[in-house]
Image (cartoon, grey):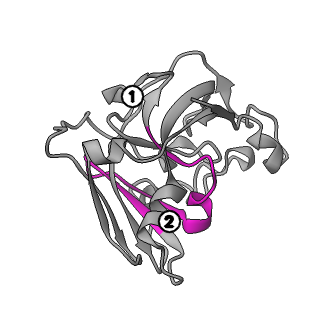
C-alpha cells in the first residue's frame, strides 16, 4: 500500500513542525473525557446524516470495504505534546462525503462517538486530504484506548477535533459546538496559533 507523507503541512501555516508550546514525545499518551466504551463488531454501525442527498449506514465489515489511504502524520494534543511520524490507515473524509452527496447548504460537520463525545469542524476543514477515519496505526488495528475501532485524525488541528470511537457524522447547515468547544476550548484549534481555548 502506498504511503502519503503529510508531515510538512506545518509549512502551510508558516510554522515549525513542532507547534509553539508543544513538546515532542515518542510515546502515545492516552487522554479521554471518560472511560473506554464497549463495542461489538456485529452490531456497530457508522452513520452519515444531515444535509446530504443520501443518508448512509455502514456495518463494520462494510466500512472496512471502503477505499483506504495510509498517511504519515504528526499528532498534536492540546495538553502540550506532539507525536511525529504516526502512520494511520483509514477512509478519507472526502470519500464518505462524495458517497453521501453533500447538500450545497452544508457548512459544518458534527462528529459523534460511542461514548457520547462530539466535536465539530467546518466542512471546508473536513474536506482536507489528511482528515481520515482511521482503524490502523503503524500497521496494526487501532488500540481501544486510542479510539479503536475507529477514530478521526486531524493533523492540522489539536487532536480533540479528532473524535475517538467515532460512529457517525452529521452535515449541518448552521455551525454547532461539540463537547469541549462548549466547555471553553477553541473552535478553530490551530496548533500553530496556539488556539487552545476560546
**Residue furthest to the top:** 26
Identity of the residue drawn at 56% across and 46% down: 154
Element class at badge 1? loop
**Magenta segment range?**
109-134
Identity of the residue drawn at 39% across and 28% down: 142
How many numbered badges does the structure rendering display?
A: 2
Residue 160 included in the magenta stretch of the image: no
Q: Earlier in the sequence, mark 2 or mark 1?
A: 2
Query: Considering only vertical position in the picture, is 123 above or below 26?
Result: below
Identity of the residue drawn at 53% across and 32% down: 88
Q: Residues within 10 Å of mark 1 (few under 14, many from 20)?
A: some
Relative depth, front residue between 145 and 135: 135
The residue identified by callout 2 is 98
The residue identified by callout 1 is 142
Residue 112 image offset from top left, x and y in percent:
34, 56
Residue 115 included in the magenta stretch of the image: yes
The quadrant holding residue 57 is: bottom left
State the quadrant of the N terminus.
top right
Q: Residues within 10 Å of mark 2 (few under 14, many from 20)?
A: few
Residue 54 image offset from top left, x and y in percent:
35, 74
Identity of the residue drawn at 61% across and 46% down: 130
Query: Considering only vertical position in the picture, is 164 above or below 45?
Result: above
Element class at badge 2? helix
Q: CA distance from mark 2 to mark 1?
A: 25 Å
Amino acid at each position: 500500500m502506498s504511503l502519503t507523507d503529510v508531515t510538512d503541512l506545518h509549512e502551510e501555516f508558516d510554522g515549525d513542525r513542532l507547534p509553539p508550546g508543544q513538546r515532542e514525545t515518542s510515546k502515545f499518551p492516552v487522554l479521554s473525557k471518560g472511560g473506554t466504551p464497549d463495542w461489538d463488531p456485529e452490531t456497530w454501525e457508522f452513520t452519515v446524516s444531515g444535509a446530504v442527498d443520501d443518508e448512509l449506514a455502514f456495518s463494520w465489515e462494510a466500512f472496512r470495504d471502503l477505499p483506504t489511504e495510509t498517511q504519515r502524520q504528526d499528532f498534536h494534543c492540546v495538553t502540550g505534546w506532539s507525536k511525529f511520524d504516526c502512520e494511520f490507515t483509514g477512509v478519507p473524509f472526502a470519500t464518505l462525503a462524495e458517497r453521501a452527496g453533500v447538500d450545497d447548504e452544508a457548512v459544518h460537520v458534527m462528529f459523534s462517538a460511542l461514548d457520547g463525545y462530539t466535536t465539530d469542524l467546518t466542512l471546508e476543514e473536513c474536506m482536507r486530504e489528511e482528515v481520515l477515519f482511521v482503524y490502523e496505526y503503524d500497521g496494526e488495528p487501532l488500540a481501544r484506548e486510542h479510539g479503536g475501532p475507529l477514530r478521526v485524525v486531524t493533523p492540522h488541528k489539536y487532536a480533540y477535533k479528532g473524535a475517538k470511537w467515532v460512529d457517525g457524522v452529521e452535515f449541518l447547515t448552521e455551525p454547532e459546538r461539540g463537547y469541549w468547544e462548549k466547555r471553553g476550548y477553541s473552535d478553530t484549534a490551530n496548533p500553530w496559533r496556539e488556539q487552545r481555548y476560546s
